[in-house]
Amino acid sequence: MTQSAQFTQLGQRSDDPPDVSARSPCVPALATAVGALAALPVGIALPHRPSRQFRSTIANAGLPVASATVTLTAFRQVVRPVPTFAIVQGVHTPARITNSMTTFLVRHPHVTFLIDPAICDDVAQRVLPQLPAPIRAFATPPSDVISVRESMEELGISPTEIAFALPTHLHWDHVSGLVDFPSMPIMSNRLEWEWATGGRRAPRGVARRALEDRAVEHYELDGPPVLTFERSHDLFGDGSVVLVDMAGHTPGSVGIVLHLGEDRWALMAGDAVWHQLQVAHVRPTASFPGRLADADRRSAFRTIQRLAAAADARITVVPTHDHDAAVPYVAAA
């Protein structure tokens, strides 16, 4: 992948207000939300435990061989304290953890790109109407949430510096920032793109506004195992940015392994986990909102078990919504 790579166009609408004809239906989302809330006390008392049998099948292929390094910057974002049990199933200590919708900037020697461009200006009017009401009810960010555009202006970054966006998956809160940058290309796992954009109705959690009329380059996870993940894709061929299969939260979710220099690595986990405590305790996301958000709960928990088995002092797991995990990478304005 280079900055001059050719992208193809997905020709859809991008007019204001957003088209809601593809919005996922409200009734099934409401039914799932009610079931997820009803299951929450069960998960608190009897959390799902990892499978010893599955764990015995996991092999660790080790880290990539890297000949280049990248830098990682987290954009500043507002923080929401949330009850720990509402994110990490069955965990109560500490009582609260921090949550945010963070976007990351990666500088490779030859190209600069965004990971999970989360929020656009006026996201509540320009994107959230494409989500069914039960999801909007709990997913709407704080009114002072910081858009990608604001963060880039704050740090003096021009949109022309950004070659492309690389989301870990295509849920609305990992791509909505692109609405402010209609000419910014996107790189997507082909399976993920087809899941998010195919069909008359969007999957639950997907708002297609950010994907409409968007130049896209697809990649395949056709490379060898990396760490405990069975498939990979070396983005630049130098081991500095390697995508790994983290299917479950969405069908084509990926993690992004970044070489930060010497023996320092970051594993950008997207929503495979929402907080580092899930890796430490090997726990799934709590049923609410987990059942609303995860496409395949069984596969999602297997990915968490792979993350736990990949634990290495050299690697920092950085979930997109774990504010504390992002703080070490936040740049001063």
Image (spheres, rainbow, N blue to C red):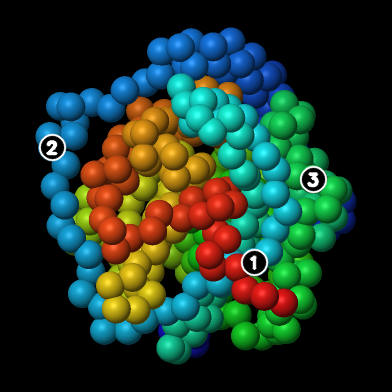
Q: Residue at x 29, y 63 (%)?
A: 314
* Label 2 neighbour load within 10 Å: few <14, some 14-19, many 20+: few
Query: Residue 177: where, in percent of width, then height?
Result: 70, 61
| Mark closest to the chain's N terminus, 3 or 1 | 1
Q: Nearer the viewer, residue 44 or 17?
A: 44
Q: Which mark is residue 286?
A: none
Frontmost of labels 2 and 1 is: 1
Q: Is residue 322 above or below residue 91?
A: below
**Could you give the CA–CA distance between mark 2 and mark 3, rounded to whole angstroms?**
42 Å
- The residue under label 3 is 142
Instruction: Kindly indicate the quadrant of the structure image that contains residue 22.
Output: top right
Q: Amino acid at mark 2?
A: Thr
- Amino acid beneath label 1: Phe
x and y percentages locating residue 215 in the rendered image: 59, 70
**Hey, what amino acid is under mark 3?**
Pro
Residue at image x 51%, y 30%?
A: 93
Residue that badge 1 annotates:
75
Q: Is residue 39 left or right of residue 232?
A: right
Which residue is more in the foreground, 220 or 282? 282
Q: Which residue is mark 2?
A: 57
Q: Secondary structure at mark 1?
A: loop
Is tag 2's residue or tag 1's residue first in the polypeptide sequence? 2
Sequence-wise, which precedes: disc 2 or disc 3?
2
143 w.r.t. 41: above or below: below
Measure the alpha-carbon separation of dots 2 and 1: 38 Å
Indicate the quadrant containing the C terminus: top left, top right, bottom left or bottom right: bottom right
The answer to whether marks 2 and 1 mark residues whose Cβ atoms lie closer than 8 Å is no
Left or right? Give the position of 250 relative to 101.
left
